[in-house]
Image (cartoon, grey):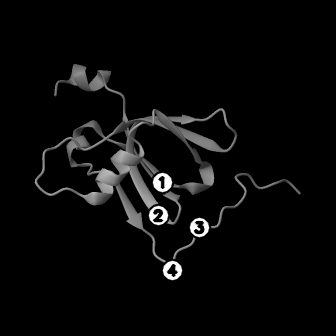
Amino acid sequence: MTKQIMAQQKPLYKVIFIQAGKQYEVFVRELLSSNIFGFIEIGDFVWDTRATIVLDPSHEKLKDEFDAVDRTFLPMHCILRVDRVAQHQIEKSGMAKIVELGDKVAHFPGPVYTPKK
């Protein structure tokens, strides 16, 4: 890729969050602070387009789940990590996936902001 093309592309973000006892890892080009208090807005999902013989069922399930979704709003307390992926690392960044957390890991939502005393 030329530097000019790379400069025109939006940055790629890897967002890892917990939902319904599962850890989701998705790649998006849009990451914003939402107008809805306590939520992060993500959109412009990026799916692995490389042709492979072996299909990952969790990747396909994720694509189906977010197929008709233009943007989604995630509660801040569900987000584990957000990484900005360097342009030259996009091909190596991997695929979106869902990982079962098992019964030994539990997520307890807490207040987004600690109230002042």
Residue 104: give its label. 4
**Residue type for callout 3:** His
Q: Work out how far the residue at label 3 is from the one at label 1, CA to CA, in angstroms.
A: 14 Å
Circles 4, 1 touching at the beta carbon (< 8 Å) = no
> Is label 3 or label 1 in front?
3
Question: Is residue 22 rendered to the left or right of residue 10?
Answer: right
Q: Between disc 4 and disc 2, whose residue precedes?
A: 2
Residue at the location (30% across, 53% down)?
A: 59
Q: Label 2 crowding class (10 Å Cα cut-off): few <14, some 14-19, many 20+?
A: some
Q: Label 3 crowding class (10 Å Cα cut-off): few <14, some 14-19, many 20+?
A: few
Labels in figure, total:
4
Q: Work out how far the residue at label 4 is from the one at label 2, CA to CA, in angstroms.
A: 12 Å
**Residue type for callout 2:** Lys
Name the secondary structure under disc 2: strand
Q: Between disc 4 and disc 1, whose residue precedes?
A: 1
**Residue type for callout 4:** Lys
Which quarter shows the N terminus? top left
Reading the image, the residue beneath label 1 is 81
